């Protein structure tokens, strides 16, 4: 942020600063009082750039919620820069706020307004935990506004009074528990995925890393000195907690074999790149092309700065969407083929939808089956075993074995 200059008005001799094209007078130029006011003004502005939004308003008036959302988003882009998932959820919450209360002064937003948002989201079929999470984000927006002195403190107190939706006591549906995905389903999906995405899936299934960790692997983050490689993500889900334990993902021989071709690049480059996926996809399309290119197609030039250029690495969301869209496309093709062949829809074998997070559950379940809960805890990188119990499902085979011997 550019610090506004301590200026002198030539006609009146008053000192002033200019913020957002508006002057704020501080008193007679050169006096200790005006210089003190200037220093205090700059300190508050540096501590909270959002003050620039509020100081344009007349004393005693509130900024509008759309202005609060804009100021908070500028803060969030820096604060949550290493957490794209958090930014996505914040973007959704801000969109909801702006859609229903864009021009509402922040002082008029209270507990009833938040309850109305709760009810609206629940009536749309959103899961209870998702509704609660978005409402927590909205509370956080107003809490941040209080800290920046652009939102009255009593507004946040009203929002705290709104209880989250309780299980079995609201119209919101319950989110289905995430379970492990069968290897047969994963194996059936991989041939239809882009090769790079398919390798990401196979690698994650073997090491049990989080989706957000798989997408940021770089050669420089790997310790390849031993028989088992060690991947230390530069950022991970719990890094903000300042936990003493660093996150280590262990990569065995099969995982190393998958990753090895992607290490022939600069040390700081991401192994899995969407631009490489796009180039590979275009190369396949050129090879499979049956008709010759027309002169106009040959003359067409690729845009040097396309509006939506692929990023330098996948995010957990783009990784997930690649899988979801592939499964949807394959299932639609199978249904169309069955319709042309005159087969009933019920006879079509469809690939069940699954997400990368289920691969982590699969790896945890296998680790628990072979090495117990402690083994699953180490593989998944959990500080507490009770968290690993959520990811690593108890094997039904073990239960059957026990029953056959002592039951």
Image: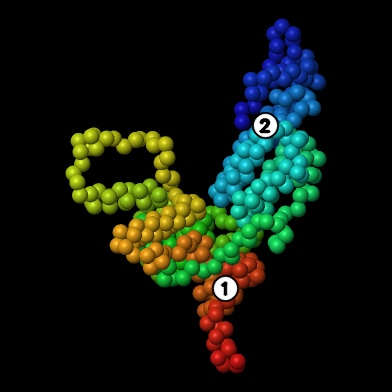
Which structural element holds mark 1?
A: loop
Residue at mark 2 to residue at mark 1: CA–CA distance: 48 Å
Position of residue 350 in the picture relative to residue 32 (left or right): left
Residue 132's tag is none
Q: Residues within 10 Å of mark 1 (few under 14, many from 20)?
A: some
Observer-nearest residue: 231 or 380? 380
| Quadrant that contains the N terminus | top right
Residue at x 81%, y 21% (from the top left corner): 33
Position of residue 86 in the picture relative to residue 29 (left or right): left
Reading the image, the residue beneath label 1 is 393
Confirm whether residue 282 shows in the render.
yes
Observer-nearest residue: 42 or 151? 151
Residue at x 76%, y 35% (from the top left corner): 107
Tell me where residue 305 appears, x and y as whole percent: 39, 35
Residue 103's tag is 2
Q: Quadrant of residue 98?
A: top right
């Amino acid at each position: 942020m550019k610090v506004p200059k301590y200026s002198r008005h030539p006609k009146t001799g008053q000192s002033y600063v200019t913020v957002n094209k508006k002057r704020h007078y501080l008193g007679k130029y050169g006096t200790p009082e005006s210089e003190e006011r200037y220093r205090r003004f700059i300190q508050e502005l540096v501590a909270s750039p959002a003050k620039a939004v509020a100081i344009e308003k007349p004393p005693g008036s509130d900024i509008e919620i759309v202005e609060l959302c804009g100021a908070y988003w500028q803060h969030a882009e820096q604060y949550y820069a290493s957490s794209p998932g958090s930014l996505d959820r914040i973007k959704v919450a801000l969109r909801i706020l702006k859609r229903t209360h864009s021009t509402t002064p922040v002082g008029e937003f209270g507990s009833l307004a938040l309850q109305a948002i709760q009810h609206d989201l629940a009536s749309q079929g959103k899961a209870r935990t998702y509704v609660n999470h978005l409402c927590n984000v909205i509370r956080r927006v107003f809490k941040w506004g209080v800290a920046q002195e652009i939102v009255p403190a009593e507004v946040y107190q009203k929002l705290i009074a709104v209880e989250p939706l309780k299980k079995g006591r609201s119209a919101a549906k319950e989110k289905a528990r995430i379970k492990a995905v069968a290897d047969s389903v994963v194996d059936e999906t991989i041939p239809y995925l882009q090769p790079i995405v398919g390798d990401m899936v196979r690698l994650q299934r073997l090491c049990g890393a989080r989706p957000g960790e798989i997408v940021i692997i770089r050669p420089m983050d790997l310790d390849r000195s031993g028989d088992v490689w060690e991947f230390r993500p530069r950022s991970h889900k719990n890094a903000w907690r300042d936990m003493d334990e660093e996150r280590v993902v262990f990569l065995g021989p099969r995982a190393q074999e998958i990753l090895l071709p992607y290490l022939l690049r600069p040390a700081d480059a991401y192994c899995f790149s969407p631009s490489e996926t796009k180039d590979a996809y275009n190369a396949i399309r050129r090879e499979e092309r049956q008709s010759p290119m027309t002169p106009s197609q040959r003359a067409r030039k690729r845009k040097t700065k396309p509006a939506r250029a692929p990023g330098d690495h996948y995010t957990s969301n783009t990784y997930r969407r690649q899988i979801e869209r592939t499964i949807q496309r394959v299932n639609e093709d199978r249904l169309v083929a069955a319709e042309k062949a005159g087969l009933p829809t019920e006879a079509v074998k469809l690939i069940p939808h699954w997400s990368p997070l289920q691969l982590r559950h699969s790896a945890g379940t296998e680790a628990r089956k072979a090495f117990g809960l402690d083994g699953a805890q180490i593989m998944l990188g959990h500080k507490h075993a009770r968290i690993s119990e959520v990811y690593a499902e108890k094997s039904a085979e073990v239960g059957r074995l026990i029953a056959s011997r002592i039951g």
